[in-house]
Image (cartoon, rainbow, N blue to C red):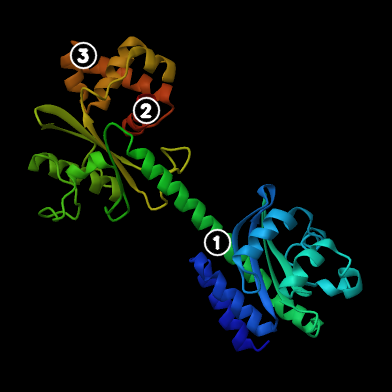
Amino acid sequence: MKPEDLSRIIDKIYAASLNSHSWEEVSLEIQKSIGGHSVNFVIEELDLNKFRYVFSNGATESDVAFYLDHIVQDDELTALLEKLPIGKAFLSQNFLPLRQLERVSAYDRFYRHIGQTYFNAANFYRYQNVRAFISIARSHRDIPFSPCDQQNLQLVIPHLSRALMINNTLEDQQITIDALGSSFEHLPFAFLTLDEHGNVIICNIRARQFITSLKQLRSNYLIRLPSSNATQRLHMLIDSTLHGSNSVRRGSVTFLYQGERYVAHCFPWCERFNHINWLDNRTRCIIFIASAAYLSGSHLHWQEAFGFSQAESNIANGLICGKSAKDLAEQLFVSESTVRFHVKNILKKTETKSQIAAVSLMLKSLMIALR
């Protein structure tokens, strides 16, 4: 194979890793470079005897349906794929010469009729119950494949393997992101995630009322609360979260909306505060917006979740509603030092190092309980 031809095929292989519809073009290019009657490119789920993806210019849809119904469970030819190392190209004629092949049931019932006798093939991917292979086929009237043909196929096999691994990884991540995005629609409060530039990544339907299409004065963030003071305060929190400023210490903003007291919480999204990165990798900030009356847990909930006392449960509900130590002291008729004592106990019991991290963890527990 000429270097320029190999380079062109490799480029198309990695392009297909980003667009699985391009496997057909890749297969045809490989067939053209090696020479064959037809080509088969298959990604199959072995435990289900099902093709996740199949392209063959030598078999019709009805041929494929017949194969799945009558041949796949007892195919001596594809059985060769399991006997040879993954990623190793092979020539079927070296294992099943023509006279022996003619006694193989799968060949007699299927492959002979679609004009596929000699195969230059490789099992290039195997993960759990998923297998992917490519085979270039020639009929019994064609010249069998040569060792040079086998070597040419071998040149592209490692790239096919890597490209499919990339493709599957991207698909799995997209499925996870889509599933998470859908699950956020069931939350009874507004939820948003932002990237490092403050752009919205995920925004559930309850949060859309707080999104504006126009950038706020002196701000790059498109989130707008009912009052300009609350909006400015939230934008300062976002800026502090994304850029590490210490000018704003409290991670919440309270405001009135439709006659109710609401609270907006703004948290950094990083490994230090979270055990598992279960959002999009671009996420750097998460925002919750909900009625202050709604964001409260019962003493039983806090006791079961973190072992809080009754006093600590009262403080926890106040922190989630964005209240300061002074606010809580006035509300609960205790001193600010008593409030700070309970906050320290809350940090200890939630195993967090900051009030923001503790509130983030407590909100997560409420999210699970409320759903």
Query: What is the C-alpha distance between the residues marked 2 and 1?
Result: 34 Å
Amino acid of disc 2: Arg
Name the residue nearer the viewer: 302 or 29: 29
Q: Which of marks 1 and 3 is nearer the N terminus?
A: 1
Residue 279 visible to an observer of this rendering: no
Q: Which mark is residue 166?
A: 1
Residue 369 occupies quadrant: top left
Identify the residue position indicated by label 3 in the image. Answer: 335
Name the residue nearer the viewer: 251 or 115: 115
Which quadrant, please, contains the N terminus? Answer: bottom right
Amino acid of disc 1: Ile
Residue at 34% in and 39% down? 184
Q: Which of marks 3 and 2 is nearer the N terminus?
A: 3
Q: In x, y percent, where is residue 342?
A: 32, 17
Amino acid of disc 3: Ser
Residue at 58% in and 66% down? 163
Q: Which mark is residue 371?
A: 2
Residue 239 visible to an observer of this rendering: yes
